[in-house]
Image: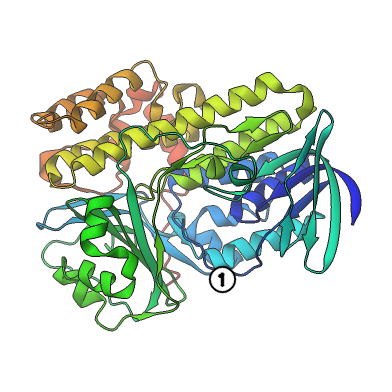
């Protein structure tokens, strides 16, 4: 295979395949290269309302209607029941000392978020790219790319076939410490506020459900991104509709050494012992493959773009899966790169540099927030206060987008919003300081009031937050709209649809 193309994308995870589809719809010739093959296990599995909105927008903007059903649990089950996913009604946090924080993201199943069973979803997306006309080659081994003024030359082997490609532009979608970071020998940069962390994870079958005692929670607590938080780390549990459960632990370096995470399955048993309820839930669990140990979770590349290349945000850096930020950051990157690809990328130096600055700025915003959560995992009141900064920012952003008012959203997590960004950063720095969490909860609630659309902090809710239309109606003035506009927005989004179960 010797040829010229407009764009080469290395890495056929969900980000690479989506980028390839968008570029194809722009009229570019695209080759998608993958070192491995599909289907395969991958983590990074939870969507959020913001990431689903971005997916819907890409689907509509680039005439990719087969993507749109993936943005909601209900439409996914109707359109692609054979592609496994999980129901995500919100975020569930259990602390080792018994405290809870439950934040719903949808009022019913039909418009809920999802967990992606990446083996199925990534395979589905790469096949969709091929159906559109994207050329795809797996088992690809690439030599060091040769960059020139007019593009980049890639030489290597895909399966048993040698290839020589000259691409006008190259996008790296291979994930942290991926293709370009390694081959160009780029340096790593620090993630501000984040401790060094390790992870141990696996896919399981035979997982029981959490038994609810007392009041009925705002959603079934297992149908969510479930987090079990302890001093220095946390455990995730994500249930999928094919009987598989993704579960793992992320911990600071000191705690990871204490637990012996590099030992695999014995370390997992030690993790379960910290949570009797979790240990009971996993008593009949069967691991579907060997445990995987990730010795370094956080990553940030010192360089994100070059003359004829760019990294997707997923390749430029990664903070932590704690708040499911990865999908949204990647989709924002695809949206921004698509605008650059509309012109000649070779003459888009300023736009590429702006893309790099936006990518890094969003990554650092996530790092500061998640770092503050790690600093307070032994103090659930402060942990909850920091979490409410996140939920206020993302719910405000989602609602503004749905109302057609994107000008209200200034940066990921509102970090560039003049009324939110500077003070929220100050509060996060304070949360990380010695004794800085004293009085933090009250100060956070006072600060987020102009952006609080979910009744966050109301004492009578006891850290259980369902999704209420009345909350949004009461907050209409914060968005500069009428209550009538709020009702119309809720109607468009399916808020008032009758509950339908697909389980």
- The answer to whether residue 207 shows anywhere in this view is yes
351 versus 28 height, above or below: above
Residue in front for this viewpoint, 237 or 287: 287
The type of colouring in the image is: rainbow
| Image vertical order of residue 7 relative to residue 483, above or below | below
Residue found 13% across the figure and 61% down from its top: 215
Q: Position of residue 198 (x, y in %)?
A: 34, 54
- The x, y position of residue 258, in whole percent, is 20, 60
Q: Residues within 10 Å of mark 1 (few under 14, many from 20)?
A: few
Q: Nearer the viewer, residue 501 or 34?
A: 34
User: Is 258 or 275 nearer to us in this picture?
Assistant: 258
**Residue 235, placed above or below residue 467:** below
Residue 429: x and y in percent read: 24, 27
Q: Residue at x 69, y 60 (%)?
A: 126
Q: Residue at horizontal 35%, vertical 32%?
A: 192
Q: Which element type, helix, strand or loop, lies under badge 1?
A: loop
Total labels: the figure holds: 1
Which residue does the numbered mark 1 point to in the structure image? 81
Name the image quarter holding the C terminus.
bottom left
* Residue 238 seen in this snapshot: no
Q: Residue at x 82, y 69 (%)?
A: 160
Quarter of the figure with residue 442: top left
- Pick the quarter of the image with the N terminus: bottom right
Instruction: Measuring from the top left, give residue 66's x and y in whole percent.
Output: 67, 56
Vertical order, 503 against 400 (above or below): below
């Amino acid at each position: 295979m010797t040829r010229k193309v407009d764009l080469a994308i290395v890495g056929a995870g969900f980000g690479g395949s989506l980028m390839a589809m968008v570029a194809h719809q722009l009229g570019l010739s695209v080759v998608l290269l993958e070192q491995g093959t599909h289907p395969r296990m991958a983590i990074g599995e939870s969507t959020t309302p913001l990431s689903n909105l971005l997916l819907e927008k890409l689907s509509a903007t680039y005439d990719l209607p087969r993507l749109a059903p993936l943005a909601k649990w209900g439409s996914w089950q109707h359109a692609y029941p054979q592609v496994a996913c999980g129901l995500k009604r919100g975020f569930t946090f259990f602390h080792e000392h018994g405290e809870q924080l439950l934040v719903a993201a949808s009022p019913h199943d039909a418009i809920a978020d999802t967990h992606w069973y990446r083996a199925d979803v990534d395979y589905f997306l790469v096949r969709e790219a091929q159906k559109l006309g994207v050329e795809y080659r797996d088992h690809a081994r690439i030599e060091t790319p040769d960059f020139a003024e007019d593009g980049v030359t890639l030489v290597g082997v895909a399966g048993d076939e040698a290839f020589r490609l000259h691409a006008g532009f190259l996008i790296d979608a291979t994930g942290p410490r991926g293709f370009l970071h390694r081959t160009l020998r780029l340096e790593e940069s620090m993630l501000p506020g984040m401790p060094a962390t390790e992870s141990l994870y696996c896919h399981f079958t035979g997982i029981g459900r959490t038994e609810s005692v007392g009041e009925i929670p705002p959603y079934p607590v297992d149908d969510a991104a479930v987090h079990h938080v302890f001093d220095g780390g946390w455990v995730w549990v994500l249930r999928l509709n094919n009987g598989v459960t993704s579960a793992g632990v992320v911990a600071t370096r000191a705690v990871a050494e204490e637990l012996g995470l590099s030992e695999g399955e014995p370390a997992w048993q030690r993790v379960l012992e910290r949570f009797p309820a979790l240990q009971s839930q996993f008593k009949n669990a069967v691991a579907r493959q060997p445990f995987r140990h990730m010795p370094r979770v956080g990553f940030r590349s010192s360089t994100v773009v070059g003359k004829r290349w760019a990294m997707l945000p997923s390749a430029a850096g990664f903070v932590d899966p704690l708040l499911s930020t990865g999908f949204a950051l990647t989709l924002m990157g695809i949206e921004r790169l698509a605008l650059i690809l509309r012109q000649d990328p070779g003459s888009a130096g300023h736009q590429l540099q702006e893309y790099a600055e936006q990518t890094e700025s969003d990554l650092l915003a996530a790092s500061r927030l998640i770092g503050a959560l790690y600093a307070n995992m032994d103090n659930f009141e402060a942990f909850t206060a920091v979490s409410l900064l996140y939920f206020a920012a993302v719910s405000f952003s989602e609602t503004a987008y749905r109302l057609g008012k994107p000008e209200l959203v200034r940066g990921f997590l509102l970090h560039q919003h003049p009324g939110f960004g500077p003070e929220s950063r100050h509060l996060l720095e304070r949360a990380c300081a010695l004794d800085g969490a004293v009085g933090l909860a009250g100060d956070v609630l006072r600060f987020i009031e102009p952006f609080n659309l979910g009744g966050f902090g109301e004492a009578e809710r006891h850290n259980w937050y369902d999704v209420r239309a009345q909350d949004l109606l009461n907050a209409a003035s914060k968005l500069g709209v009428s209550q009538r506009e709020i009702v119309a927005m809720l109607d468009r989004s399916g808020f008032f649809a009758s509950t339908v179960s697909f389980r």
